[in-house]
Amino acid sequence: MTIFSSILLGIIQGLAEFLPISSSGHLVIFKTFLPGLEGLTSDMTFDILLHLGTLIAVIAVYRKTIAGMIVDFFKMLKQIFTGKFSFKNATKYQLMDIFVIIATLPLVLVMFVNDVIEEKMTGLLPVGIMLLVTAALLFIADHSVPGKKEIRDMTPFQALKIGLFQMIATLPGLSRSGSTISAGINMGFTRQTAVEFSFILGIPAVIGANILNLKDIIGSGIDKSLILPYIIGIVTAAVFGVLAVKLVQYVTKKDRFGWFVYYCTAVGALAIILSFAL
């Protein structure tokens, strides 16, 4: 692994993880046309570290909200054990904790079929089709009437529905952030609320996936000669992750999801055409 390749993959991971364009779909496309990436993207240790970089990014941007959720989570536990907790009187951060937990539950089902998904859905054709689906979801969200609902207006069932969108978005080419943000907007939540909930919802998903992968690298250890590329990859993913989150926040504020609609449509159509040409 070279410094250049670690930077390249860090950029891809940082941008595509948060922009509604599907990081998994783009990795399939890049590996098709840059065969040298195949070996790099199969490095489980590096993959986990890149996800660590994107976790750092989202935590850095939403640090106040996440800190509030952690503090209020333990307060909620104390209230539950003392019989003083009331859903009606829960704080905003406690509601975020509850809804994130509920929305994460559907991902448990994916654990049993994830290997099949990765095996059957990693070609250019399925990725291209899913990118077009992503474009359609973003188009609908972009043309939805602006909602006024905040986290306090969310119900457990709505949180579960957003979680189901996140579960389906494990298909390569179907953007996780694009699917969950679109779901939130179409349920009548403000664009800012939909974006914030989507990005924070991704934290336990990434942590859970990496914990499952840890068993595959514990025995092999870390190659000391790759420590520098690993560190550079983490930093690159974190920096570009922050930039991607900020860009989505800006696009959301300006109601310009159409930018990503055009992009996903173009890349999806190109992937489908090339799947028949190659």
Image: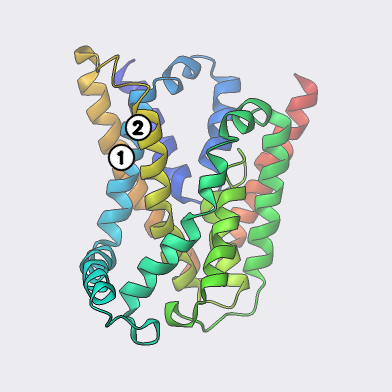
Expressed as whole percent of the image width and height from the top left, the position of residue 170 reads 57, 43
Badge 2 amino acid:
Ile
Instruction: Determine whether 215 is above or below 243 in the image.
Output: above
Please rate how many residues cluster around mark 1, counting C-alpha atoms within 10 Å: few if below 14, some from 14 to 19, many from 20: some
Badges 2 and 1: C-beta atoms under 8 Å apart? yes
What is the count of numbered marks? 2
Spatial CA span between label 2 and label 1: 6 Å
98 or 86, nearer to the observer: 86
Task: Find numbered disc 2 in the image and state the secondary structure of the residue it sits on.
Answer: helix
Expressed as whole percent of the image width and height from the top left, the position of residue 185 reads 57, 71
- The image quadrant that residue 207 belongs to is top left
Q: Residue furthest right?
A: 276
Residue 229 is left or right of residue 199, and the answer is left
State which quarter of the image contains the C terminus: top right
Q: Can you identify the residue that label 2 sits on?
A: 48
**Residue 262 appears in the rendering:** yes
Instruction: Determine whether 36 is above or below 273 in the image.
Output: above
227 or 236, nearer to the observer: 227
Residue 217 is left or right of residue 137, and the answer is left
State which quarter of the image contains the N terminus: top left
Q: Can you identify the residue that label 1 sits on?
A: 52
Q: Residue at x 38, y 70 (%)?
A: 96
Instruction: Determine whether 132 is above or below 69 in the image.
Output: above
- The image quadrant that residue 97 belongs to is bottom left
Q: Residue furthest bottom?
A: 89
Q: Residue at x 51, y 40 (%)?
A: 23
Badge 1 amino acid:
Leu
- The image quadrant that residue 10 belongs to is top left
Q: Residue at x 35, y 83 (%)?
A: 86
Task: Find numbered disc 1 in the image and state the secondary structure of the residue it sits on.
Answer: helix
